[in-house]
Amino acid sequence: MKFDLKCKFVLSKEMDGMGEFLKNFVEEANDSILRRGAAGKGAEIIEWNAEGDAITMRILSEGNIRSHEGAVRIKKALSDRLGKEYKVGIREIIIIDYVINIEVEQKPQGKFSIPFAELNIGKDEVEMKIKDRGEEFMRENYIDRMINLVKEKIKSQYYDGKKEYWELIWKSGEKNPVWNNDPSEEMQKAGWIVPGSTKGKWFYRPPAAAIMRAMERIAIEEVVLPLGFGEVIEPMHVSLETWLRTGHLEGMPGEIYYICEPTTRDEKQWEHFVDLVKITKEVPEDELKKNLKIPKAGVCYAQCPNIYSSFLGKTVSDSSLPILLFERTVPSDRYESGGRHGIERVDEFHRIEIVYIGTKEQLLELRERLIERYKHVFKNILDMEWRMARVTPFYMQQAGVAGQEEELSKGTIDFEAWLPYRGDRDKEWLEYQNISIVGEKYTRAFNIKGQKANLWSGCSGVGLERWMIAFLSQKGMDPEKWPSEFKKYLPELPGMPEFL
Amino acid sequence: MKFDLKCKFVLSKEMDGMGEFLKNFVEEANDSILRRGAAGKGAEIIEWNAEGDAITMRILSEGNIRSHEGAVRIKKALSDRLGKEYKVGIREIIIIDYVINIEVEQKPQGKFSIPFAELNIGKDEVEMKIKDRGEEFMRENYIDRMINLVKEKIKSQYYDGKKEYWELIWKSGEKNPVWNNDPSEEMQKAGWIVPGSTKGKWFYRPPAAAIMRAMERIAIEEVVLPLGFGEVIEPMHVSLETWLRTGHLEGMPGEIYYICEPTTRDEKQWEHFVDLVKITKEVPEDELKKNLKIPKAGVCYAQCPNIYSSFLGKTVSDSSLPILLFERTVPSDRYESGGRHGIERVDEFHRIEIVYIGTKEQLLELRERLIERYKHVFKNILDMEWRMARVTPFYMQQAGVAGQEEELSKGTIDFEAWLPYRGDRDKEWLEYQNISIVGEKYTRAFNIKGQKANLWSGCSGVGLERWMIAFLSQKGMDPEKWPSEFKKYLPELPGMPEFL
């Protein structure tokens, strides 16, 4: 990596006659200030000039003291000296021109761009040029993040389109399905479910609602409560700040439903809007826009971020570990553009999210107990054909953060069920829940600490619509044919109103 | 009322020499077309002229055939004749100038305005002038709605600032409160509730969540299920179309949290946004705006509109009446600008909404049974000091739609509890739930019909946060001091994690 920075230190007033002073300062800087902590040569000022209210410098580096870091050190030291010697200060540093040659591990596979810089993409190297930027670029760490972004984009050229890693770890015996119809279609025909008035959301009439509630009770009474999880109720709004911490805003901003507050409740401000509604019986969109703020939050995508957020900055007594919580109140929204299907793939769904925070050992043990309880449910109560697979998104396989064993401890197990209506028993499986351990990802992001213990965390999401679809696909809609242990949770289906 | 319309019928081509034809047509129109169905004189064309591709007319009316309605009739008849006589059609009608003198029942108390018109507000009359508008103004009924809006705004000048009607109908005996602390404050101190990351929303840790769930179970097991209500689960999104039908978009647009879909899920379209997030670790608001659609929906404000919407256009068999449903899944949001207080007055809360659709007689009987069950809960289980009051918003008192008895059948009963922490036993009461019967308001709006029966509807909203606050305000947070019947629902409180 080579860093070649031309920058300007703006003084609090015009100066001249600083030649000797500057020559001495640069020598000292090159000898000590720019070498402090260097693994290798450090950075070096190779040109400098003073004119009017500006001192310009060109700072080169090939080591760990990058030129922009050097410039920040220079500003501090130079301010001190200028203050003592001339009673003058430094207002700010301006990047005139900054060329960084980024050595990349993988060869770039094509062109790409990033904000705030021009890129020349070569065979083994990317040249990044930044011009005319202010001091926040150095201070707020933009430059290091821009370098990382370049490397990440090259890496993504390798995994784009590749499938996620999938490894079978357990499989139930085969079960004879009682039918091979699509439960979503059949429920819609029977009027048990009705499409909502916006896309990918459903209204559940009493028979469908009763099945979903039975699934919820099974999960809670057979898995959640026996393992000692305590219920929390969280806000449905997730602030964008929270998603900055979790990374959702980088990972899936196009899948979020965003929420706008009104600019005001004041009826006077809304009067024109209301008048237009009353006259036209339509939504006056321009007037609506005027009365809305830019979103500061979105609808819950998964419940865990708000749970972590409730622990922001907390230090937890070791005796309270592991913390075992679950949330089942807020619905989750994910914007699906295509591929919606019945209640199987929807924009709004209901899940129980189980969250655990504790030591690595506690979490690994808990995972085994969770699997055991889930097995009990899927075998003895729902009597399903299902399997477990270890999955890792491709980019995480690449990351190889802390070696093999560490990686195996983390990661996600998917639970899948065969959908007879889709056919092929080898291929047509639906993921209906998962268990993850994410290491320190979220405890770090939310600064959640143990008294002495190093805290990991993880979660397990039980998708109630998915449980329903998996079960109904294999067992049908006729309660007569349902497993007896399930019928204990739902002895009979409520009736439907009759429509003419 | 006087209607004086100058309008232009735009022909499909330029014409001349139609003098005699038009004279005859106008005579006929004044004699028959503009008199059909008139209570009184009908409308009258008093001037006309043909030039180029336009026929202009001035149409006067003081009766029920308003001039704009006359113009629409004229268009139809004139099109027929012009087609037969000259093979020419009428493209559209344009309002050149329309002056309507609106007689108003109440004297205007001050100036006001409405869209699409200039108003001259006199002592007993309002002159409304409309200029240069297209045919949709006449066809889509804008003009009649504008006249109504004028009348409504005058009416609102009389009730603005007036309190809603309130009449005590029942009161429990006095109860000695166990403390006079503010439960929201105390729960926050104890860590049972934590402010969410956006305003007016709370995170409930296990002790608080357990109390809320106990309240929910009491309502369901003691009120909802014994009366035969069946559970439904509805989408959390309410489309603006639905709120156009219910009137929420006229009534409280400034209290709604609006929801935006992303314009796309396409990662390429979001790449610049994601890059900026990665570099700046902030939300790039301009880039976010570009990637969002205008809201088509908002977060549930109360559950009943989506329940009605699920019955849109349905005719219900008389044997299925009354339809008895409840919803307890989606949270409700209301934007509160000021006046937020703990979990007592919040932007997001949890309620059970009970909805009933049936004949007037069925609903009146049901209301009695609901009151009886609620009384049982508040007396025997929660042991509270509470009261019921009949309330009617002031403007509804004015409406007097269908006489006294009808009005008493409809309307809302509020349930209120004394809050000892606020002091004065005469004044400091909190509304914690209600029962309403709304007549045909929503069955009409959603075109829900009975086989033979004329359908009314109503609902009862159980606010779980409000139940909690009412109970904790009087009974405190120490389970030792709680009524024994309540303790059957919550034998012990779950523990809290210990923070350092």
Image (cartoon, coloured by chain):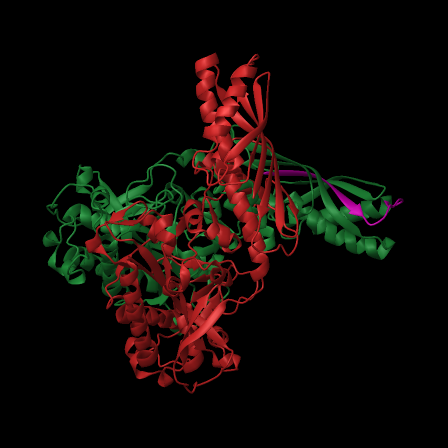
Chain colours: A green, B red
Quadrant where the C terminus of chain A lies?
top left
**Where is residue A284 shown, x and y percent of the image?**
52, 42
Residue reaching furthest right?
A: A17
> Is residue A11 located in the magenta-colored stretch of the structure?
yes
State the residue in front, B174 or B112. Answer: B112
Say above or below: B276 vs A230: above
The reply to whether residue B185 is in sight is: yes
B403 displayed left or right of A424: right
Residue reaching furthest bottom?
A: B176
Say above or below: A497 vs A283: below
Residue A87 falls in which quadrant of the image?
bottom right
- For the point 51% across and 24% down, the residue is B27
Find the magenta span and give its range: A1-18
Say above or below: A190 vs B302: above
A81 displayed left or right of B9: right
Residue A132 falls in which quadrant of the image?
top right
**Where is residue B70 shown, x and y percent of the image?**
50, 32
State the residue in front, A35 or A98. Answer: A98
**Where is residue B202 shown, x and y percent of the image?**
46, 64
The reply to whether residue A359 is in sight is: no
A464 displayed left or right of A124: left
- For the point 75% across and 41% down, the residue is A57
State the residue in front, B45 or B319. Answer: B45
Quadrant where the N terminus of chain A lies?
top right
> Is residue B71 located in the magenta-colored stretch of the structure?
no
State the residue in front, B402 or A23. Answer: B402
**Where is residue A245 shown, x and y percent of the image?**
50, 54
